[in-house]
Image: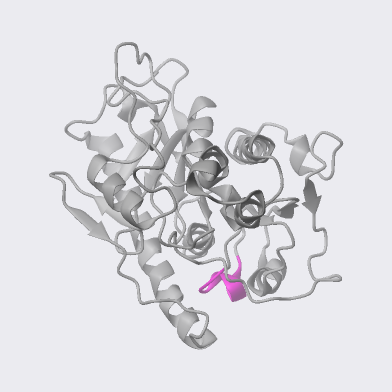
C-alpha cells in the first residue's frame, strides 16, 4: 500500500484525511504507545482525492520509507511539510514489517518479522534485517514502476491532475531507521533515486562496502556514531553530510515527537521518561529544524536551490552538529535503532 501527498488545487468542503485508516488505527492503538481511551489519533491537513494543483507544472517526487514496525504515516509531520513546499510525496507501507497495513475492504496485515531481542546474536540479527531491507528495496522498485505506469497511462481513481504534476525524472527518497537503510540500499541497487536522506538508521547490505555516487545525508540522533555509518562513509562518492541533532533520540524523527508531549500526562509517563524516548530538545523546535534540513536538502538536489543550512554550523541552528571526519575521535558502537513501535516509555 502507498499513499500520495501532493499540493492540491482546493480542499474546501472536504473532510481531513485521517492519520491512519480506521482498521489499521484500531490495531495500532491496541498494541502501541497511544492506546484508545487515553489518546485520540489526529487527522492530517489533507483533503482526500482533492484535485492536484497543476499550476507550476511538474513537481519532483519524494519517496518515504518508515522504520521497522512503524507505518507509512509515522513521519507525516515531515511528509506534509514537504508537500507544502510543492513536492509530491509517496509514503510506502512495507507489509509484514510494518506494524499494520490496511488494504481496501478492511483487511489488515500485521507485523510478521522474527523477534529481534537483545539476546539475538548480531550475525542472526543482521541476516534477518538484511533480508527485510532487500524486500523493502523490491517494494521501492515496484512502487517506482507503478508510478511510471500511472504517469504514462493513467490509473483509475487517481485524483484529477495528479499524473500531470509528477516529474519522475526528479525522484528522491528519505526514511527513518530501517527506512533510512532502505533509502541508501535502494540507491546502491541502482534505482533511479537522485538523492537520499537517512534519519538515524543503521545501514545494511551492499551500500556499506560499495557506497553510492549520489548525494546522501545522514542525520543522526544525539551521540549517534553507528559503526555502519563509519564503515560506509569512505565509500560515499557524491555530496555527503553526517549531521547530529543535539537533544534528540531515535524516535524524534517520527510523529511521536509531536504526539507524545501532548499525551504524556494522560499516559502517566514522567518528563524524564518522555525525554528518554524523544530527547530533551523541545518538540516544536526539533520538528522545525528537521523540516528545514529536509526542505534544504531536497531543494538543493532536486531544484538546484542554495542550502546554507547544510554548509556547516550556523547561529540559527546550533542544534545541528556536523561531523566533518566521522572517524576522527569517534567511539564506535553497535546501533540498536531498529526496534519496532512496541518499545515503551
In the image, taking residue 71 as reference, residue 328 lies left or right, namely right
| Residue displayed at 60% across by 63% down | 212
Please provide percent x and percent y for residue 80.
48, 32
Does the rendering let one see residue 195?
no
Residue situated furthest top in the rendering? 12
225 relative position to 105: left or right: right
Q: Position of residue 179 (x, y in %)?
A: 48, 57
Q: Which residue occupies the foreground of this view, 73 or 134?
A: 73
Identify whether 345 is placed above or below 39: below
Which residue reaches farthest left?
Answer: 105
- The residue at 29%/26% (across/down) is 48
Count of marks, rendered view? 0
Q: Is residue 124 above or below residue 41?
A: below
Q: Name the one closer to the observer, 220 or 282.
A: 282
Q: Is residue 317 left or right of residue 111?
A: right
The residue depicted at 48 percent of the width and 63 percent of the height is 343
| Displayed quadrant of residue 240 | bottom right
Q: Is residue 169 visible?
A: yes
Q: Is residue 204 part of the magenta span, yes or no?
A: yes
The colour scheme used to paint the residues is one colour
Which residue is at a point 71% across and 71% down the rendered structure image? 230
Percent x, y of residue 82: 53, 33
In-front residue for pair 124/203: 124
| Quadrant location, the C terminus | bottom right
Q: Is residue 332 above or below residue 172?
A: below
Considering only vertical position in the picture, is 16 above or below 256? Answer: above
What's the magenta region?
Answer: 203-211
| Residue 157 image position (x, y, % from top left) | 19, 31
**Magenta-colored stretch includes residue 37:** no
Q: Quadrant of residue 141?
A: bottom left
Amino acid at each position: 500500500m502507498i499513499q500520495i501527498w501532493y499540493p492540491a488545487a482546493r480542499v474546501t468542503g472536504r473532510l481531513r484525511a485521517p492519520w491512519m485508516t480506521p482498521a489499521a488505527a484500531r490495531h495500532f492503538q491496541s498494541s502501541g504507545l497511544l492506546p484508545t481511551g487515553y489518546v485520540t489519533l489526529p487527522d492530517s491537513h489533507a483533503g482526500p482525492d482533492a484535485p492536484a494543483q497543476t499550476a507550476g507544472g511538474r513537481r519532483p517526487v519524494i519517496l518515504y520509507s518508515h522504520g521497522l514496525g512503524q507505518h507509512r504515516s509515522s513521519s507525516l509531520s515531515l511528509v506534509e511539510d514537504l508537500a507544502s513546499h510543492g513536492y509530491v510525496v509517496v509514503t510506502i507501507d512495507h507489509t509484514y514489517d510494518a506494524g499494520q497495513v490496511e488494504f481496501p475492504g478492511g483487511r489488515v496485515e500485521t507485523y510478521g518479522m522474527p523477534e529481534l531481542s537483545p539476546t539475538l546474536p548480531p550475525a542472526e540479527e543482521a541476516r534477518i534485517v538484511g533480508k527485510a531491507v532487500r524486500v523493502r528495496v523490491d517494494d521501492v522498485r515496484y512502487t517506482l514502476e507503478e508510478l511510471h505506469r500511472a504517469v504514462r497511462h493513467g490509473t483509475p481513481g487517481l485524483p484529477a491532475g495528479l499524473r500531470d504534476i509528477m516529474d519522475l525524472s526528479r525522484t528522491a527518497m528519505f526514511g527513518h531507521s530501517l527506512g533510512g537503510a532502505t533509502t541508501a540500499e535502494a540507491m546502491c541497487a541502482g534505482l533511479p533515486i537522485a538523492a537520499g536522506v537517512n534519519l538515524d538508521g543503521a545501514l545494511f547490505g551492499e551500500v556499506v562496502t560499495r557506497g553510492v555516487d549520489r548525494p546522501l545525508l545522514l542525520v543522526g540522533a544525539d551521540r549517534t556514531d553507528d559503526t555502519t555509518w563509519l564503515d560506509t562513509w569512505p565509500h560515499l562518492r557524491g555530496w555527503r553530510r553526517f549531521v547530529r541533532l543535539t537533544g534528540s533520540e531515535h524516535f524524534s524523527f517520527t510523529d511521536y515527537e509531536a504526539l507524545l508531549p501532548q499525551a504524556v500526562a494522560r499516559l502517566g509517563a514522567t518528563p524524564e521518561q518522555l525525554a528518554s524516548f524523544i530527547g530533551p530538545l523541545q518538540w516544536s523546535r526539533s520538528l522545525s529544524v528537521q523540516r528545514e534540513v529536509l526542505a534544504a536538502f531536497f531543494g538543493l538536489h532536486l531544484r538546484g536551490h542554495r542550502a546554507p543550512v547544510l554548509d556547516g554550523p550556523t547561529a540559527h541552528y546550533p542544534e545541528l552538529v556536523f561531523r566533518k571526519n566521522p572517524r576522527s575521535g569517534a567511539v564506535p558502537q553497535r546501533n540498536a535503532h531498529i526496534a519496532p513501535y512496541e518499545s515503551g516509555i
